[in-house]
Amino acid sequence: MSHVIIGTAGHVDHGKSSLIFALTKRDPDRLAEEKERGITIELGFTWLEHPDGSKSGIIDVPGHERFVSHMLAGAGGIDLALLVVAADEGVMPQTREHLGILSLLGISRGVIVITKCDLVEEDFIELVEEDIRDHVRGTFLEHAAVRRTSAKTGEGIEELRQTLFDEIGKISTHKEQLPFRLPIDRVFTLGGFGTIVTGTLIEGVIENGGQAAIYPGEKNARIRSIQIHEQSKEFAEPGQRVALNLSGLKKTDIERGDVLAAPGSLMATTRFDAELTALRNTRFPISNNMRVHLFHGAREILARVILLDIDTLEQGQTAIAQLRLEEEAFVKYGDRFVIRFYSPLETIGGGVIVDPLPAKRRRGRPDNGLDFGVMAGEDRAARLALSILQSGSRLSPLDSACYRAGIAGRDRAAILGELVRKNLIVMLNERVAVHRDTLKDLGGKTAAILENFHRERPLERGMRREELRTRLLPRTDLQLADLVIDSLGAAGYLETTTGLVCRKGFAVSLSEEEKSVIAELASLFTASAYTPPGIEEITAQFGKRANIGQVLSLLISNGTLIRLTPQILMPEELVNQAWEIAQSTIAETGQITLADFRDKLSTTRKFAIALLEYFDKQRKTKLVGDARVFYA
């Protein structure tokens, strides 16, 4: 059996706590003030025992309008709702508000309970039941069972108990494989134990002795012990009410609304995209840029509602919206939330999160509706593809894209594999992927950059890879940028050779005059031997006949000339011959001095030093004292 949380809902003084006591023989009201005033102020917790010995948790919520925020702190974990209506009063304001909240939270099953049936006649109960049916029409309780009860006389209690067993058997949850998450609705200290937190485990499995983190802040803690329904356990599963003894944290480190979760499993956000629904009986339409109280899990945050395609959301309508929060929150794909009017406090709507980490959206853009259509859909691969696409050239980690798309770890590899097979994404490495449309866009930009480069510098074989990386992806990690360039090469947008990149199919084309200049340069360098002309001298001699800078760059890039220093160039053949001389001398004598090398080359100190320092940079030699030896 799946673990199920039963939650009460209804107007103040309609007998919710008394009903729970009649079902369980345990009073959910624990505060002296609650017992003195006869109303529930804080969340109450107990359990319902099943015939097979298993238990379902029960959350008893406050019904008074002043404590709706307390009700919301516990309502997020409810699987099965008990809508409680007193026979002597019928449907009241908090009955309607609580019903709206339950609907907004996506609760799909429930039972309607008419209490205090001993106080009125049968005919009046019939009218109350008819009124209730009118109010729940069109909600998840439209076809729910109705049970008439009296906590005082015991009427209907056993029938209600059996109805609950039947409904619990129809509820199935499959959230065991997710990282654990527990919104904290109570925190206190206990002598001899330390810090205790309670909440409803909505996802994953918590194990005794395991590591956990408190969000916000990601403060680390260890699970010292677990209690479920006042019994010590080694683990807790989704749908259970849990009390956890934490080590490593003080009570002051935690407050209601924080979330206990697996370390690293939640991501912070200050906005999220949602399908937002206005309650059908709210007095206040939801307008664009409205400031509201937002309730998520057990937490309350101030937020702004940005309606993306309309100005006002009327009663009962649903629209796409972005909620912009006034402080960080830790929400996940598919989470439910509720919003209340800023003042007076009154529930006006809520909805479901379809993107927990969106970019800031502008109103009225056509792609808003298209994006929401994908992100709110059932196709998880399409959601992930869109999340990767929207990360664009920022190349956000796949962890973020999967988090946005609501994809759990064990499904991640299969869905990524599907997208690769469909040629929708390219995996750069295990952590980052790029969408084919992003790659196409980067390919277009690359082609433009290289085309301009080849036009301005036609005699160079290509642009330095580092220069392309800087111009194309200036804020991207170097390794990732290189992987993108490799992917662009594989896709045919460019060619790469020895640190250079060029347009696909590019080849240097020389004019007759340029060919003549190159031939004359070769003769000049050969004649000069180890006292070659400087770049300024070459420029003065050939600059009017050709772009000599381009010609020299070509000869350097194809290896004909070697740049020893910024001003000294020498033919590769001569450099190799010089190395043979240095190598044989060191092999015979163990070293070569600058003077000896200069004399052997019949050159000047300037050129001899340039050659030796070049060999040092090549790690062929190294300077020891005033002589060169082999680099070891």
Image (cartoon, rainbow, N blue to C red):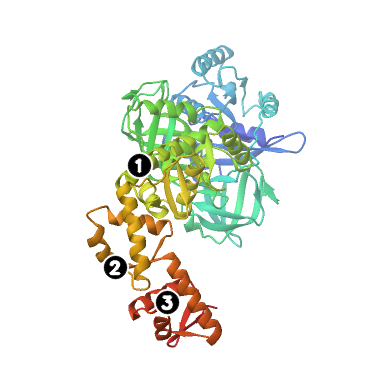
In space, the residues marked 1 and 2 are separated at their CA atoms by 31 Å
Residue 228 got which mark?
A: none
User: Which of the image's four quarters has the N terminus?
Assistant: top right
Q: Tell me: 141 left or right of 279.
A: right
Q: Position of residue 588 (x, y in %)?
A: 55, 85
- Which is nearer the eye, 64 or 53? 53
Going 45% across and 34% down the picture, which residue do you hit? 437
Q: Which residue is mark 2?
A: 534
Residue 612 got which mark?
A: 3
- Which is nearer the eye, 589 or 574? 574
Secondary structure beneath dot 2 equals loop
The quarter holding residue 394 reads: top left
User: Which of the image's four quarters has the C terminus?
Assistant: bottom right
In space, the residues marked 3 and 1 are separated at their CA atoms by 39 Å
Going 57% across and 24% down the picture, which residue do you hit? 116
Q: Position of residue 254 (x, y in %)?
A: 49, 54
Residue 451 got which mark?
A: 1
